[in-house]
Image (cartoon, rainbow, N blue to C red):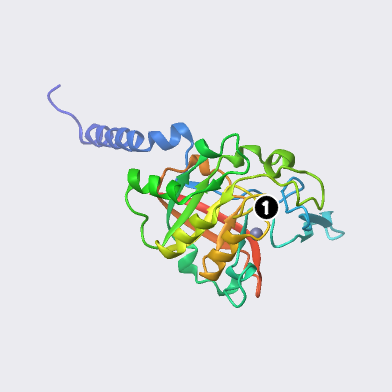
């Protein structure tokens, strides 16, 4: 082959580019993976609410062809602030602290870390996350980044949407027989006194464990203006660190909590 025509050279060059792009994109194409992980459950009939709270309800107002010939659908919805994947504003358990609309966005968007306590909580629905759990994470991963959004994986997400297994009781109004892990008083104090965190979330129905009667984790975090995220999804898909959290609650003026769309962006 003495001479390769100009067009052939261009074609070879183009094929080369396709091969390079193909190699670079292949992991995404082959696994269908996104760099975003959805940490929110959808709101529908199966969404879990606190036993005394109003559940999510979608009321269809219209769905169909209008007399003028175009399609139209529209619903009303109603629900308690606290249910499904949602945000607890500091004001929920601390008088005068931030309501939903007062929380600065800087507290809701930032570096996330995940503390996996699943090996301790497994088989123990009354497990309380300890300060030692956080120190163990730091021993393996380095100190908590300043202003981190701390997500705690208890493993309870695996029971969603089975109310009985997730909450411990599926009876309406029954708050006496709730059993699921939560954050101990000592661990909450560690987060606000010995570290600087922006927000704290977990994969159970409450920051405090099911058998709590005075909700110390809510009180301590709220008093320090630290928002909480509850009923988080897909925490098992997150690494221990190296991701950004974007947590945008419904912007309810004066809200003590709100439905939350929260995603992690892998770095
Ligand atoms: Zn709540």
**What quarter of the picture does the N terminus occupy?**
top left
| 119 in relation to 70, above or below | above
- Tag 1 secondary structure: loop
Taking depth in this image into account, of 13 and 96 the one nearest to the observer is 96
Q: Outermost residue, top direction?
A: 1
Of 1 and 107, the residue lying toward us: 107
Quadrant of residue 28 within the rendered picture? top left
Residue 63 position in % (x across, y down): 82, 54
**Camera-side residue of 83 and 222:** 222
- Which residue is rendered at x = 76% and y = 55% of the image? 56
- Near-viewer residue (83 or 18): 83
Taking the image in four quarters, ligand 1 sits in the one at bottom right
Drawn side of residue 5 relative to residue 27, left or right:
left
Q: Position of residue 192 (x, y in %)?
A: 46, 64
Q: Position of residue 60 (x, y in %)?
A: 83, 55
Position of residue 220 measured from the top left corner of the image (x, y, whole percent) = 54, 65
- Total residue callouts: 1
Q: Extreme left residue here?
A: 2
Give the side of residue 60 with respect to residue 266, left or right.
right
Q: Give the image quarter of residue 59.
A: bottom right
In the displayed structure image, the side of residue 233 where residue 116 appears, left or right: left
Residue drawn at x 51%, y 58% as measured from the top left? 188
Which residue is tagged 1?
A: 84
Residue at the image point whose x is 76% and y is 43% from the top:
169
Vertical side of 248 occupied by 102: above or below: below
């Amino acid at each position: 082959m003495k001479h390769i025509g100009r067009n052939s050279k261009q074609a070879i060059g183009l094929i080369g580019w396709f091969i390079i792009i193909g190699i670079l994109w292949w992991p995404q194409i082959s696994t269908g993976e996104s760099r975003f992980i959805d940490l929110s459950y959808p709101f529908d009939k199966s969404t879990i609410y606190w036993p005394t709270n109003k559940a999510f309800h979608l009321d269809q107002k219209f769905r169909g062809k209008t007399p003028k010939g175009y399609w139209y659908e529209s619903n009303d919805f109603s629900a308690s602030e606290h249910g499904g994947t949602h945000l607890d504003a500091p004001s929920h358990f601390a008088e005068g602290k931030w309501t939903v609309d007062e929380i600065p966005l800087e507290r809701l968007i930032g570096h996330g870390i995940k503390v996996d306590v699943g090996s301790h909580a497994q088989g123990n629905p009354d497990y309380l996350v300890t300060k030692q759990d956080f120190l163990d994470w730091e021993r393996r991963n380095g100190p908590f980044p300043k202003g981190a959004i701390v997500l705690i994986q208890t493993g309870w997400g695996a029971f969603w949407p089975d109310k009985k297994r997730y909450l411990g009781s599926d009876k309406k109004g029954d708050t006496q027989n709730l059993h699921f892990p939560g954050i101990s008083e000592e661990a909450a104090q560690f987060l606000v006194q010995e570290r600087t965190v922006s927000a704290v979330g977990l994969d159970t129905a409450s920051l405090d464990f099911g058998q709590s009667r005075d909700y110390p984790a809510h009180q301590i975090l709220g008093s320090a203006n630290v928002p909480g995220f509850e009923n988080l999804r897909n925490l098992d898909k997150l690494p221990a660190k190296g991701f950004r959290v974007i947590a945008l609650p419904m912007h309810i003026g004066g809200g003590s909590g709100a439905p939350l769309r929260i995603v992690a962006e892998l770095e």
